Amino acid sequence: MAQRQLNIRSDEAVERAGRLAKQLGKTTTEVVVEALRSYEAAIQPVDEHGMTPEQRRRYETLLDIAREARQHLIPGGPENHDWLYDENGLPK
């Protein structure tokens, strides 16, 4: 696949990207991509709980896992997990 190009017609942008790339030991392209990702993350929409769509998706996945695990719990099962740990609180 042919690589697409982005032409920057700003001396300041080119100079800043080049300077950052040199300081960070990265390519100018890497610096620009990271900057764009940071900018995009900063302006992503959030829901009423302050979560981005990706955070909400991960949260819902974890809730699904917890619901599935709950189905396998034994009612009235032992709540004491001392058998898992030694006298110093380390795993046996």
Image: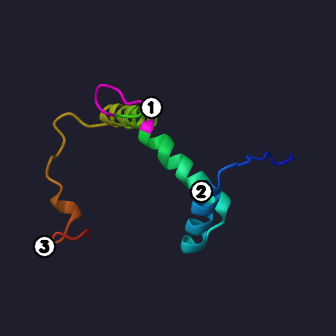
Q: Which residue is drawn at 19% across and 61% down?
A: 83
Disc 1 packing (10 Å; few <14; some 14–19; many ≥20):
few
Q: Along the polypeptide, which appears first: circle 3 or circle 2?
A: 2
Q: Along the polypeptide, which appears first: circle 1 or circle 2?
A: 2
Residue linked to disc 3: 87
Q: Give, as a three-letter code, the residue at label 1.
A: Pro
Q: For this view, does 91 lie left or right of residue 60?
A: left
Residue 47: within the magenta? yes
The vertical placement of 45 against 90, above or below, is above
Label 2 secondary element: helix
Q: Which of marks 3 and 1 is in front?
A: 1
| Label ID, residue 53 | 1
Quick one: which residue is furthest to the front in this view?
A: 11
Label 3 secondary element: loop
Residues 51 and 31: in front is 31
Question: Residue 10, position in %: x, y?
Answer: 65, 51
Q: Along the polypeptide, which appears first: circle 3 or circle 1?
A: 1
Q: Give, as a three-letter code, the residue at label 2.
A: Glu
Question: Residue 69, position in %: x, y?
Answer: 34, 37
Residues 68 and 37: in front is 37
The number of discs equals 3
Q: Give, as a three-letter code, the residue at label 3.
A: Glu
Q: Which of marks 1 and 2 is in front?
A: 2
Residues 92 and 17: in front is 17
Q: Which stretch appears magenta? A: 43-50
Q: How far apart are marks 3 and 2 (CA)?
A: 63 Å
Residue linked to disc 2: 12
Label 1 secondary element: helix
Q: Which of marks 3 and 2 is in front?
A: 2
Residues 22 and 26: in front is 22
